[in-house]
Structure formats: C-alpha cells, structure tokens
Amino acid sequence: MSKYSLVAMGGTFDIIHKGHLTLLSNAFDISDKVIIGLTSDELAEKKKKILIHKYEKRFENLTTLLLKKYPRSSFQISKLNNDFGPAVLEKEVEALVVSDETSNQGNVLNKLREDKKLPPVQIITVPMFLAKDGKRISTTRIKNSEIDVEGNLLSIDK
C-alpha cells in the first residue's frame, strides 16, 4: 500500500543521472502514481539552461526509462511552462518530491494552492546524491566532463 495516491515532481532531465534516479525512486517508493513535470525548452531557456536535447527527445528518454524501471507504476509526464505545472491545480496531488536544492519550491507551491482553495501538499525533500568527490551530481558537471552519470570522477587532474 502506497503512502500517497498521487505525488508530483519535476525536472529538466536533459541527461538522466543518478540524482534524477534517486528522486524518481523516492517518488515511486511512496506512490504508485506520479506526475512528472518535464521542463519545456522555453522554460529551460528562460532559466538560462543550455540543453543538449530538445523536449521531444527528453520526453522519449524519460518515458523509456520509466517504463523499464517502474513497469507496474502509473505516471504522467506533463510539459512544464512554469515552475509547477499540474501540481498547482490537481486537487488529488498529495505530495511534492523535491531535492535539497529545490525544497523552497514546496512553500511557494503550497501558497499557490492555498490561493486556489486547494489543500496543501506534503513536501518530501530527497537529499542530493553526491558524486565521488562529495559534490552534488548535476547535468552541468556531466556536460563539463567532470563526472559521469553515476557520479564517478572523469578529470585526471582532480
């Protein structure tokens, strides 16, 4: 029996790495149904993110991963044109899964839900997954060839 009937989370998922997998596994550990907000290309650009993959490819990669890793779970991927997407409007959303880095978003979300007369969601903060050097795993570090998707160091001068 899952703790929550529906949880939400979000991300850009440009290069899917161990940090993303940690967030996803936490979401599916507490609910069999997860709404995943996938950042649109426009929102990523607005946030000054330099993408390797366009939205369609990120959607395809994420879908493939979810079907393989969580075949018995239900998920919905929604395009995020703002920071929250369906988590603001879906009355049934009971929890928001966030990383340490984005945990402040929970308070903002609950304020928006309160304004819309919706119940607050539980904020589930998942600690950042650290690379072998003790720093956080991020897509930027992977793109810079500092680490791989597992958090292993790649640079020989470290």
Image: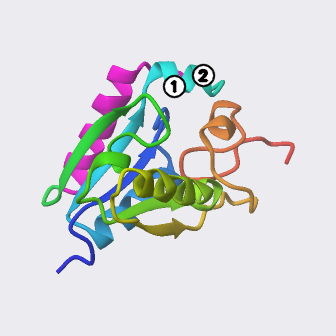
Residue labelled with disc 1: 43
Q: Amino acid at mark 2?
A: Lys
Residue pushed farthest left? 72
Q: Main SS of the magenta segment?
A: helix
Q: Is residue 140 left or right of residue 89?
A: right
Q: Is residue 18 visible?
A: no
Who's the residue at 74% across and 62% down the image?
Answer: 134
Quarter of the image holding residue 84?
Answer: top left
Where is residue 60 shown, x and y percent of the image?
28, 29
Q: Does 114 appear above or below 63?
A: below
| SS at mark 1 in the image | helix
| SS at mark 2 in the image | helix
Where is residue 16 shown, x and y percent of the image?
46, 42
| Nearer the observer, 97 or 131 | 97
Q: Is residue 136 visible?
A: yes
Who's the residue at 41% across and 54% down the image?
Answer: 113
The residue stretch that appears in magenta: 51-70
Who's the residue at 53% across and 67% down the image?
Answer: 125
Q: Does 123 appear above or below 48?
A: below
| Nearer the observer, 90 or 134 | 90
Where is residue 80 shown, x and y percent of the image?
40, 33
Who's the residue at 56% across and 60% down the image?
Answer: 107
Where is residue 5 shown, x and y percent of the image?
20, 68
Q: Amino acid at mark 1?
A: Leu
Residue labelled with disc 2: 46
Q: Are marks 2 and 1 in contact (CB under 8 Å)?
A: yes
